[in-house]
């Protein structure tokens, strides 16, 4: 009888982040109880989330390329944030590749209504892989 050893290696990712992303300007997100807007100001941005705690929702705006690898986002206990429907990650007005990888989005917060990931960036390529979204709640009239 042949015995086949279980593989411990992970399969290759389907999509790689944009070339040179490690040299993009870095924006660190630290706010845990509010929305953070990260503006690429028309250029590239590497967004770093903390490894030791979840942050609040983020908006990625006005970028060419943006990359997030790893981290956790936790919904806020509301349906709206800054007057808009809550979204854990919202991509707006980007034109290149937005690469979101290995992020955990937790919507299991009392009073929270949120979308996991939303976009209004018709000229962008949105790459989402190895992302876990759980506990989302919403209503038919909103999120």
Image (cartoon, helix red, strand yellow):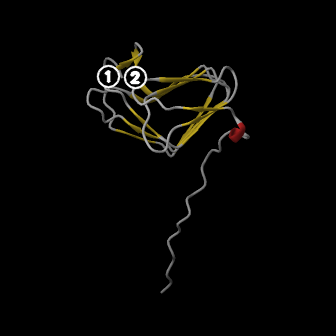
Q: Which residue corresponds to the image point at 69% horizontal and 34% vertical from the top-left?
A: 24
Name the residue furthest bottom: 1
Q: Is residue 79 left or right of residue 6?
A: left
In the rendered image, residue 79, in percent from the top left (x then y), is placed at: 33, 21
Q: Earlier in the sequence, mark 1 or mark 2?
A: 1
In the rendered image, residue 124, in percent from the top left (x then y), is placed at: 63, 27
Residue 130: which numbered mark, if any? none
Q: CA distance from mark 1 to mark 2?
A: 8 Å
Q: Quadrant of residue 33?
A: top left
Mark 1 vs 2: CB contact within 8 A: yes
Label 2 element class: loop
- Nearest the viewer among 37 and 100 is 37
Residue 78: which numbered mark, if any? 1
- Nearest the viewer among 77 and 85 is 77
Q: Which residue corresponds to the image point at 31% horizontal and 36% vertical from the top-left?
A: 108
Label 1 element class: loop
Q: Quadrant of residue 91?
A: top right
Q: Residues within 10 Å of mark 2 (few under 14, many from 20)?
A: many
Say how many tags the image has. 2
Is 103 placed above or below 85 here? below
Residue 86: which numbered mark, if any? 2
Is 121 placed above or below 46 here? above
Is 33 placed above or below 81 here? below
Quadrant position of the C terminus in the picture? top left
């Amino acid at each position: 009888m042949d015995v086949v050893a279980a593989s411990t290696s992970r399969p290759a990712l389907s999509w790689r982040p944009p070339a040179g992303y490690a040299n993009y300007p870095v924006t660190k997100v630290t706010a845990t109880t509010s929305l953070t807007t990260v503006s690429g100001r028309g250029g590239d941005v590497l967004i770093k989330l903390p490894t030791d705690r979840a942050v609040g929702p983020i908006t990625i705006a006005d970028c060419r390329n943006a990359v997030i690898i790893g981290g956790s986002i936790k919904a806020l206990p509301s349906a709206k944030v800054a007057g808009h429907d809550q979204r854990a990650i919202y991509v707006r007005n980007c034109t290149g590749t937005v690469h979101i990888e290995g992020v955990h989005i937790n919507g299991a917060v009392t009073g929270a209504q949120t979308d996991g990931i939303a976009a209004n960036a018709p000229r962008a390529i949105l790459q989402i892989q190895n992302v876990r979204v759980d506990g989302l709640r919403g209503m038919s009239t909103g999120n």
